[in-house]
Image (cartoon, rainbow, N blue to C red):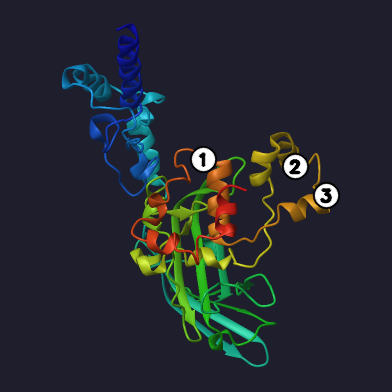
Amino acid sequence: MRKALIGVLVLVALVTVLAACTGPSGTVGPAGAGRSRGSCRSRRCGRSPPVLPALLGPPVPLGLLAPLQSRRRSLQPESCSICHKNVGTMHQASYDQLYQDGVIQVTDLKYSFAAPDKSTVSFKMTKDGAPFDARKAQGLSIYFTAYNGKKFQFEPYAASKSLAGKLAYDGNGGVTTSVTGTVDYAQVPGLIVVFGRNETIGTIPGTRVAQNKYPFATLLKTGAGVDYKSAANVAGCVKCHTDPYLKHGYIYGEVGKDPTTDFYTCKACHLDNGPGDHFEWQLALDNPKLAADFLSGKVKLTPEQEAQYAYNTSLMNDVHMSHSMEFPYPQSMASCVTCHEGKLDTVLADVNFTVATARAVTP
């Protein structure tokens, strides 16, 4: 009888923990303050974490669950208001100022080539519908990245080619820039990617995440074009990040709200065969002290250590490794569906779910 009573008490305690760990879903904040253009943690605010499978035996009588249901309604362990009582409105107002979608528009992106080696890029920019001088933008980048039908990379390896030379402004929103030392990229399958930001507020300390008001991006396919389809979804990023999702705080993961462009802008830098140098990600698991010393510059890795932790800069590697090793909260990498919803058949296929994929998640 005593063992049975202890069993019931343990069961109730476990159910209480599960109930406390599961917060109500939906918008949080004072009076259900909604999102404007950006949000503190976007759709993740107040979302319930995954419910564990029912491994605790037979169902608990409903009478026992009544007080637990009441307790569940009163707890919001993932709500911003836990640590920031009565300031939700102020925080939301700040985020409404940041990451404003579509204020700056980039149109009429064109590319031309003049022998022997000159590439010219032109486009138009507006801000709130009025002509905007791109020379006033920050972080303005123009890259060409090659696509071989499966991967974004140059063979042999080379970094993406910057096409951003000195900008010439026509006074009416039009911009032209030229660089030499190129081939005719109009004949090479790939992408010309333009991205940047305006009115930068600052950078989050210790990161490359720029806090800014007006991000922008546009794309131009070259050669035979690009038919790349990502196995992940930008909609998955929005669950924990800003809406719209902006890599490094300003690079659109999806251009023009078109899901067929998911992560195209990221490919401008994250080449599939580029050498990675964020060794601290794997070191954080294997040797935390060495990881801290490496990041602070106190020590350098030996050639043998660099070879041991070598990896490529593919977007998959960078996202998997950073999120599973450096930033495991709020999303465990064990839950594939968060980022790959509707595409698990592709992700888990034998041809894709390889040792390299698994190693990027847990070395």
Residue 174 lies, with reference to residue 52, above or below; the image says: below
**Element under disc 1:** loop
Amino acid type shown at disc 1:
Pro
Q: Position of residue 112 (x, y in %)?
A: 54, 87
Left or right of 232, for residue 206:
right
Left or right of 17, for residue 163:
right
Q: Name the residue under label 2.
A: 294
Decide: few, some or many residues near mark 2? Use Cα within 10 Å; few <14, some 14-19, many ≥20.
some
Q: Which callout, 1 or 2, points at the residue further toward the start of the chain?
A: 2
Which mark is nearer the camera, 3 or 2?
3
Amino acid type shown at disc 2:
Phe
Left or right of 275, for residue 172:
left
Q: Residue at x 67, y 51 (%)?
A: 278
Q: Which residue is drawn at 81% across and 46% down?
A: 300
| Residue contact between numbered discs 3 and 2, judged by CB atoms under 8 Å | no
- 262 or 18: which is nearer to us? 18
Q: Where is residue 187 in the image (x, y as percent from the top left)?
A: 55, 89
Q: Which residue lies furthest to the top in this view?
A: 2
Amino acid type shown at disc 3:
Thr
